[in-house]
Image (tube, helix red, strand yellow):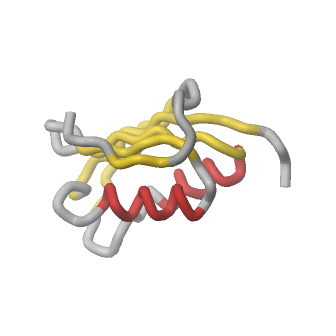
Amino acid sequence: MSGDRKAVSLRITGRVQGVGYRAWLAGQAEAAGLDGWVRNRRDGSVEALLSGLAEAVDRVAALCRHGPRMALVDRIQAVEAEPPGHPGFTQGPTL
């Protein structure tokens, strides 16, 4: 596995609130050893920052296209980002 690291900011739209998406994504990120956070947005989207080994970030970002069982993802916008200023992965409040 490569030691390359990266961070990406995701904005996920569709039926992604009220279906356990934040908790699901936090579990996926923690299992992959990623740092970052996930939170709901008032506009109905979910926003996340994934940071860690590039392969793990890419793998979790790809899983986000499907999400948990009840989710229906319409679109994911991904942009390069700065790593978070803290280790671990957290669920934040709605912003």
Left or right: 8, with 23 as reference point: right
Q: Residue furthest right?
A: 2
Q: Residue furthest bottom?
A: 69
Q: Position of residue 91 (x, y in %)?
A: 34, 48
Instruction: Give me the residue at 65% from left, 43% from top.
Output: 52
Instruction: Give me the residue at 71% from left, 46% from top.
Output: 53
Q: Position of residue 6 (x, y in %)?
A: 66, 36
* Screen quadrant of the N terminus: bottom right
* Screen quadrant of the C terminus: top left
From the viewer's side, name the closer residue of 89 and 24.
89
> Height in image: 45 above or below 62?
above
> Height in image: 88 above or below 41?
below
Instruction: Give me the residue at 47% from left, 38% from top.
Output: 49
Q: Position of residue 92 (x, y in %)?
A: 30, 42
Left or right: 27, with 57 as reference point: left
| Count of labels in the image | 0
Instruction: Give me the residue at 20% from left, 40% from top.
Output: 94
Quadrant of the rendered structure where residue 3 is? top right
Left or right: 88, with 46 as reference point: right
Q: Position of residue 24 (x, y in %)?
A: 38, 64
From the viewer's side, name the closer residue of 83 and 71.
83
